Amino acid sequence: MGTGPALGAGFFFIFTSMKHLVAPSLLAADFTRLAEEVELVNESQADWLHLDVMDGHFVPNLTFGMLIIQAVRKLSTKPLDVHLMIREPEKYIEQYRDAGADVITVHYEACPHLHRVIQQIKESGAIAGVALNPHTPVSALEDILEEVGLILLMSVNPGFGGQKFIYNTLLKIQRLRNHLAVRNLSARIEVDGGIGLHNAEKILQAGADVLVAGSAIFKADDPKDTIRRFKEIGGEIMKFV
Ligand code: DX5
Ligand code: ZN
């Protein structure tokens, strides 16, 4: 941790350096051994546990809902980072919060009344996140950035684990990091999909501060050690406060 002045947009910011967060995505875990998989995350250096909720409508796949999250809440010692890939998420925000979500992220593309949903998440007491699909420009968030605690940039098309990282995401991360700095905002930038030890450094250098990884962690021979290696990559992130 260090602080110091930095010049930006014609005036001085105070910046502080922070280590990035790692959020293993349970989607790639072995669900026949769910308790053991959650326990390995508990014992690791992971910061959050990422949970992918899919409804078969917003994305062409179905996963789990609040019942599983409630069960995971009982097993996990880490904050639960719930990524809702569902239509009409406003119908279920309080239920996901009650199930144990600490961060609730909804998709920009699924919310015609995004501002209202973000307020609803904040009122529930969770950190409010908004996710962007690969084709949605970060400029779409211009009028909502002040309201959110986290922006999730999808680096694959949502719906499945194990896909290839879309490299255009690096430009989106840089653009968003720049917007946040110029406007003196401290929302976190989370990146999700196709992340492995081979590309994590580039993603962090572009300005990400939360890395989600499913297959790269749970399909590894030693998931705990892989999490440790994810944590060790790169330097510290400079955040404006
Ligand atoms: C995809 C999900 C991701 C997924 C990432 O729609 O949002 O969180 O679990 O999986 P990997 O790391 O395997 O690409
Ligand atoms: Zn996700």
Image: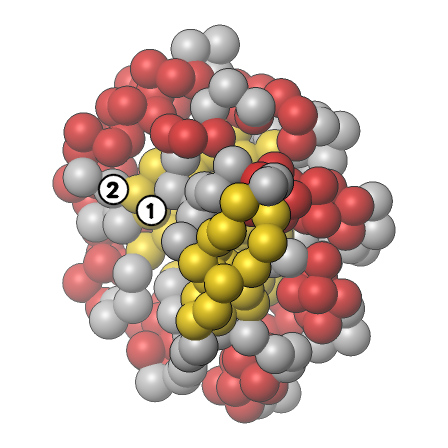
Residue at 44%, 77% in the rendered image: 2
Cα separation, mark 1 vs mark 2, equals 5 Å
User: Looking at this view, is 107 or 139 the one in front?
Assistant: 139
Query: Residue 121: horizontal and vertical position, in percent?
Result: 27, 31
Mark 1 Cα shell of 10 Å, populated few (<14), some (14-19), many (≥20): many
Circle number at residue 103: 1
User: Looking at this view, is 43 or 124 the one in front?
Assistant: 124
Colour convention of the picture:
secondary structure
Asked if the residue at tag 2 contacts the one at tag 1, i.e. Cβ–Cβ closer than 8 Å, the answer is yes
Tell me if residue 162 can be seen: no
On screen, residue 66 above or below 90: below
Residue placed farthest to the top in the image?
A: 112
Residue at 25%, 42% in the rendered image: 126
Query: Residue 57: horizontal and vertical position, in percent?
Result: 55, 22
Residue at 68%, 47% in the rendered image: 173
User: Looking at this view, is 66 or 103 the one in front?
Assistant: 103
Looking at the rendered structure, the secondary structure element under dot 2 is loop
Query: Residue 212: horizontal and vertical position, in percent?
Result: 55, 60
Tell me if residue 82 can be seen: yes
User: Looking at this view, is 99 or 192 the one in front?
Assistant: 192
Query: Residue 168: horizontal and vertical position, in percent?
Result: 83, 44
In the figure, residue 53 lies in which quadrant?
Answer: top left
In the figure, residue 32 lies in which quadrant?
Answer: bottom left
Residue placed farthest to the right in the image?
A: 167
Disc 2 target residue? 126
| Residue type, mark 2 in image | Ala
| Residue type, mark 1 in image | Val
Residue 171 in the figure: left or right of residue 41? right
